[in-house]
Image (tube, rainbow, N blue to C red):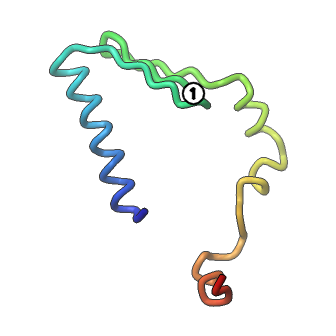
């Protein structure tokens, strides 16, 4: 997916949540796996999973998360698979 598609999708989701909160006076709870986002009575609360701080604090976290250190454009020019 292109950046524009992802951006538009996220913007639409946030706008829908804003409408639910402001227009329909609803509470929202989003369980995202690594955190829970709760909007209740127009207050925001975010609770992160216990394991997350241990994983992010690990010195190898950043190198594990990176798929490559060179720009993607380099891969496109040198790899046809």
Relative to 32, 22 lies left or right:
left
Element class at badge 1: strand
The image quadrant of residue 74 is: bottom right
Residue at which label 1 appears? 35
Relative image position of residue 71 (x, y in whole percent): 63, 76
Relative image position of residue 40 (x, y in whole percent): 36, 12
The image quadrant of residue 15 is: top left
The image quadrant of residue 77 is: bottom right
The N terminus - image quarter: bottom left
In the rendered view, tell whether residue 6 sits above or below residue 28: below
Give the residue at x 20% y 28%.
19
For label 1, count other residues whose C-alpha is less than 10 Å away and answer few (under 14), some (14-19) or many (20+). some
Relative image position of residue 16 (x, y in whole percent): 25, 33
In the rendered view, tell whether residue 71 sits above or below residue 54: below
**Residue sitting farthest toward the front:** 81
Relative to 26, 74 lies left or right:
right
**Residue sitting farthest toward the bottom:** 77
The C terminus - image quarter: bottom right
Relative image position of residue 54 (x, y in whole percent): 78, 32
């Amino acid at each position: 997916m292109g950046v524009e598609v992802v951006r538009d999708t996220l913007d639409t989701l946030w706008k829908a949540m804003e409408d639910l909160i402001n227009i329909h006076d609803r509470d929202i709870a989003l369980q995202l796996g690594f955190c829970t986002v709760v909007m209740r009575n127009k207050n925001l609360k975010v609770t992160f999973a216990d394991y997350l701080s241990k994983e992010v604090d690990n010195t190898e976290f950043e190198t594990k998360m990176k798929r490559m250190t060179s720009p993607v454009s380099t891969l496109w020019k040198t790899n046809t698979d």
